[in-house]
């Protein structure tokens, strides 16, 4: 439930509400605004008498949260969450573009790609150091050495980096290198991992599971949020359907649904959503038109030589054209594409 306090409610009145909730082992999320305070009560609120709480001094009204996801809901937080990462604010009204290869393959490859996407208009660098692959015989990534190459690329370009974390034990190490932790589709319901990234209080991008409902996806986000880590963004990356002409079916519907249901920023991944570079630009444009806060796009200087997902990777020159197209679409719906920061 959400307890909305009256303007100028006293500290003692707020403390009484918190004490009542804690008596029933509920967690408290306090939001102090300029005019009033909102107290989110999370947990089993059934034993708490709503009418009694509404009669307590300083309380304006009590609003039940009907969605199974509580902290992620618009009911809990009507205003959009804005996540600062480097020089950028994700969810703040400016479109942010993340770009780079599926996997970090070598120092020269990631430095070349980082420079190319920065010049084309990307704001953040993506690249996998640890790669979950369907086959155990496929390239699994360079591990910590890949993280070091990513950190060097950040130093060269000034771009924050996003990379995937696959298991709880790796969270502390990857936090030392990465600006955003990515939870991949296969790990959307890896609850131990969700708890670990929640406790890290690091920015997290949570990808949608291949066959997951939007509600299930938001419930996974709730695991992260339950630890007080509010820096969570949702990433639509396509779902499995009966269609075989593309790798996955990109669910553009999910973007406005999420915008209605949650305050968390929404990122679109047209590369995995299609699995074919020929369709990436069209779906990226559609995602921006639907209201996405950002894009994450795979770019490789030589896709035919890529060790992972080359078939869905754009060449730098195609990516540069897409960035220019996106600017026009963003302007048409009242958004702007963030300015690229000056290199460090």
Image (tube, helix red, strand yellow):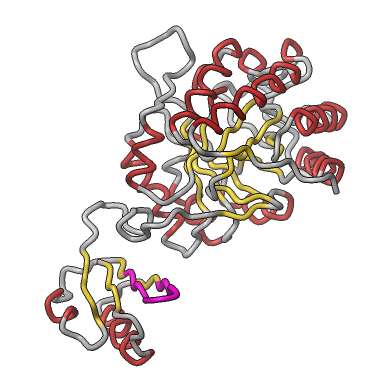
Whether the magenta-drawn stretch holds residue 9 is answered as: no
Query: Residue 294 vs residue 49: left or right?
Result: right
Assign the N terminus to one quadrant of the image. bottom left
Of 118 and 243, which appears nearest the observer?
A: 118
How many marks overall?
Answer: 0
The answer to whether residue 318 of the structure is visible from this angle is yes
Q: Quadrant of residue 20?
A: bottom left
- Most frequent secondary structure within the magenta stretch: strand
Query: Residue 311 vs residue 42: left or right?
Result: right
Residue in the picture at 35% in, 33% down: 212
Give the x, y percent position of residue 72: 38, 54
Magenta-colored span: 30-40
Give the x, y percent position of residue 244: 42, 8
Of 138 and 151, which appears nearest the observer?
A: 151
Of 191 and 119, which appears nearest the observer?
A: 119
Give the x, y percent position of residue 13: 31, 89
Residue most toward the top? 245
Query: Residue 88 vs residue 250: left or right?
Result: right
Residue in the picture at 80% in, 44% down: 154
Give the x, y percent position of residue 328: 59, 27
Of 300 and 36, which appears nearest the observer?
A: 36
Residue in the picture at 13% in, 76% down: 49
Considering only vertical position in the picture, is 178 above or below 113? below
The answer to whether residue 148 of the structure is visible from this angle is no
Considering only vertical position in the picture, is 50 above or below 135? below
């Amino acid at each position: 439930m959400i307890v909305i306090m009256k303007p100028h409610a006293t500290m003692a009145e707020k403390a009484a509400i918190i004490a009542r909730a804690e008596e029933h082992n509920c967690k408290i999320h306090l939001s102090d605004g300029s005019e009033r305070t909102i107290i989110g009560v999370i947990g089993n609120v059934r034993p708490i008498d709503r009418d009694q709480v509404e009669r307590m001094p300083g309380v304006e009204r009590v609003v039940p949260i009907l969605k199974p996801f509580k902290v992620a809901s618009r009911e809990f937080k009507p205003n959009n969450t804005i996540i600062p990462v480097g020089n950028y604010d994700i969810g703040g009204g400016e479109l942010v573009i993340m770009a780079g290869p599926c996997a970090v393959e070598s120092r020269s490859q990631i430095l070349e790609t980082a420079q190319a996407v920065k010049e084309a208009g990307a704001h953040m660098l993506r690249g996998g150091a640890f790669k979950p692959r369907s086959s155990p015989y496929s390239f699994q990534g360079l591990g910590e050495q890949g993280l070091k190459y990513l950190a060097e690329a950040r130093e060269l370009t000034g771009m924050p980096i996003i990379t995937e974390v696959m298991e709880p034990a790796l969270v502390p190490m990857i936090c030392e290198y990465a600006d955003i932790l990515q939870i991949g589709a296969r790990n959307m319901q890896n609850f131990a991992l969700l708890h670990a990234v929640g406790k890290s209080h690091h920015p997290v991008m949570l990808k949608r599971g291949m066959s997951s409902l939007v509600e299930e996806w938001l419930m996974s986000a709730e695991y992260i949020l339950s630890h007080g880590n509010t820096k969570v963004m949702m990433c639509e990356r396509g779902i499995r359907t009966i269609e075989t002409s593309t790798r996955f079916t990109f669910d553009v519907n999910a973007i406005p649904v999420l915008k209605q249901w949650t305050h968390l920023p929404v990122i679109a991944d047209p590369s995995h959503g299609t699995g074919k570079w020929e369709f990436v630009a069209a779906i990226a444009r559609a995602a921006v038109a639907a209201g996405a806060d950002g894009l994450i796009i795979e770019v490789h200087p030589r896709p035919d030589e890529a060790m992972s997902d080359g078939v869905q990777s754009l060449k730098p020159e195609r990516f540069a054209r897409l960035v220019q197209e996106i600017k026009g679409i963003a302007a048409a719906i009242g958004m702007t594409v963030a300015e690229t920061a000056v290199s460090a």
